[in-house]
Image (tube, rainbow, N blue to C red):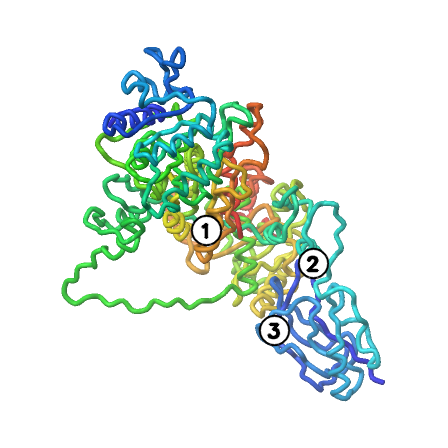
Amino acid sequence: MAKMMYRDAVRSTIFEAMERDERVVVLGEDVVGGMGTAGGPEAIGGIWSTSTGFYDAFGPDRVIDTPISESAIVGAAGGLALAGKKPIAELMFADFIGVSLDQIWNQIAKFRYMFGGKSTCPAIIRMAYGGGFNAAAQHSQSVHHFLTAMPGLKVVMPSTPEDVRGLLREALRGDDPVIFLEHKALYGVTGEVPDGDWTIPFGHARLTRAGQDLTLVATGLMVSRCEAAADALAKDGIGCDVIDLRTTSPMDEEAILDSVEVTGRLVVVDEAPQRCSLATDISALAAQKAFASLKAPIEMVCAPHSPVPFALELEQAYLPSAAKIEAAARKVLGYR
Amino acid sequence: MSKLRPFCMPKWGIEMTEGTIAEWMVGEGDRVKRGDTLCLIETAKITNEVEAENDCVILRVLAPAGQDVLPVGALLAVFGDDDVPAAEVDAFIAAFVPAEGGVGEAPVASGDKPAKPAAAPAAAPKKIATNRPISPEALALAEREGADLDAIEGSGRGGRITYQDVYQHLRPQAAPVLRGAAELAPEDLRIFASPLARRLAALHGVDLSGLTGTGPRGRISKHDVLAAVPAPASGGAAFVAVANTPRIAPFDKVRGVIAQRLTAAKRDIPHFYLRVAVDVDALLALRKTANLVLGIKASINDYLVLAAGKALARHPDVNVQLHGDAVHHFPHADIAVAVASPKGLVTPIVRQVDRMTLPQLAAATAAQIDKAKAGRLSWEDLDGGTFTISNLGMFGIDDFDAVINPPQGAILAVGRARREAVETADGGIDFATRISLTLSVDHRAIDGAAGAQFLATLKGLIEDPEQLFG
């Protein structure tokens, strides 16, 4: 078992896939990241250093720097996938997905369906999302909820280096388009990654803390904040289930409902604003299918309905914190 | 024409919202005189006799005695000055609108105009003027129940107060039943099992690797694990369990109030406990003579109550009630004596014990205990009190820690008298009769030293009981 950073898990898993499968190609803005468009020995491999060394190892045919055009990148990835390649496109910031929504939503998500299953589109679209980096309103958003709402896409949100590896491998071995959302604040996080050839199936949540009093559901960066809240609550004898969903489409509904059956209390944590979010979706699921188990109204800890602030202090206040999660948990526990 | 009068559920205090007719002393058609007892009404705190305010005829009894809980203001019966045709009484009842606040006997209404239409509904809502955003139902609830909107934080958009916010505010704090953390089985990536399935497998010792999943995409679900839980091995004649069905006894009002108050006391009051053993041989000897001389039947408990009253008078810093942030010091000791009545623990109060003589005290205590046992304690018997004595010595309890009865500052727990070996002045061994006294003290109002000094005075009075007659 090796210790590695989240960003290294991304890099090494793609590198391994490119070694193993000639069809895997990487494309995106600055994925070569060298001293000029042709790349070179100093290439840093994109702004997140997730393709360092790729250009030297696999050359310009499989590591392709693109113009700054998200619609072109996603469109090209869709075309490559239809033509038999396994493209991994990098969009840098998820915030800029808007200009490629037609390619994602109307094209690659629907190819398999509209071609009657005669063609598949195994394109992986990687992007960094989330706040906490003082990167302002256009570089800090969480967009998983509206991607999750699009039928035909798999949406993956790993929270640990181990999950990056297992889930990215699963994406590479499947035939469907996958949105792979990497949280900016997690790139520097280090964790154990088991050796061997294993994958994590989509739609299979991870239970990171087990308790019988309250269920906390989260994704990405919010998982560790839920864990911190759960640890604080544990000092008062309050046991929390912390569920890391890992993928939001498909979503592990059974894990949520099973847990709520045990605890009877649910707090959903989501980095996006609450309205029409993953949090409201999960809350509706529990309200619909676990109503009889609930002992208190469901609480949601989400961002305010506002753009992500630039000022560091405001941004910290904007994001769900462990303290806010703990307060919501205590509110749910205090319901009478 | 005869005047008809409604008899409604009275309101005997700000907290009273409902009551139950425990017993009717009169029946339909009875003619009663002013001052006659009409019925017994039981509330969460007390049972009170209700007397007729005028001479009248009981024309109709609408609320039978029993367990029906009726709101304040509910129509219980109709009285008249004379016999009135049934149809007229029926019309009066049909047209009756409960008055605001709830009254024992509503203002007299004539038979022609059976009842004055009241604008307000039964529970006497009080209008609340507020600029805060609040839902109409929430405002109605707050007005109905007299909720303080300033104390409520709205959970809606822009701080809007919802019905649930008010409802939650009005309900007493509940301590959730916590079950704590559960064992977390490490995830084996080679086995595809749901989180709950893994927990259950760890709990029941099921090996997941041998299971076939029936969940989505072949995942092992909780049902697969539960199906694989091994049946317990049988040896010889199996023990057959019979149904262990509980008899469910919901709290009656008294029990409910006891539970609520004592839970709050134990949770909110920082108790500390002072314990002392007191020699009572002198007291026991004196009691025999004194009771003979005085011609009374004072119990040991009466002597202890008297001693506590005199000790409290000397230590006004223990003779206190705590109200919010203020400590109320009382010059005289109103001592609540805990009595196990048929309805549960009640604490009637003996007033100004420090000013009483022993015969006065014995008579007052006996009267209160009789009332408690008959379930006829009034609000005045239970309200206030500056100190409580709880004696479980008669049940063979050595010593115990009593829970403070708020707003009082302290309670004295008295254990049984027992013979103990004690060292004599010359180093020998003698036997003495001792009781254990435990003072539970609210540390917010009373310091340790004050409590200790009070106990020392009390010990001195008991061990030298002639002082009680000084």
Give the residue drawn at x 52%, y 32%.
A319
Say what secondary structure mark 3 lies in: strand
Numbered mark located on residue A285 in the image = 1
Report in which chain the residue with disc 3 lies. B
Q: Quadrant of residue A303?
A: top right
Q: Nearer the viewer, mark 3 or mark 1?
A: 1
Is A31 positioned to the left or the right of B136 in the image?
A: left
**Marks 3 and 1 in Cβ contact (< 8 Å):** no
Within 10 angstroms of label 1, few (less than 14), some, or many (20 or more) residues? some
Say what secondary structure mark 2 lies in: helix
Report in which chain the residue with disc 2 lies. B
Numbered mark located on residue B144 in the image = 2
Q: Is residue B412 visible?
A: no
| Residue type at the position of mark 1 | Leu
Within 10 angstroms of label 3, few (less than 14), some, or many (20 or more) residues? some
Within 10 angstroms of label 2, few (less than 14), some, or many (20 or more) residues? some
Residue B98 on image: x %, y %: 74, 70
Q: Is residue B117 visible?
A: yes
Residue pointed to by mark 3:
B22
Is A198 positioned to the left or the right of A261 in the image?
A: left
| Residue type at the position of mark 2 | Arg
Residue A224 on image: x %, y %: 41, 33
Q: Are marks 3 and 1 on the same chain?
A: no
Q: Quadrant of residue A164?
A: top left
Q: Nearer the viewer, residue B179 or B406?
A: B179
In the picture, the quarter occupied by the N terminus of chain B is bottom right
Give the residue drawn at x 19%, y 49%.
B210
| Residue type at the position of mark 3 | Ala
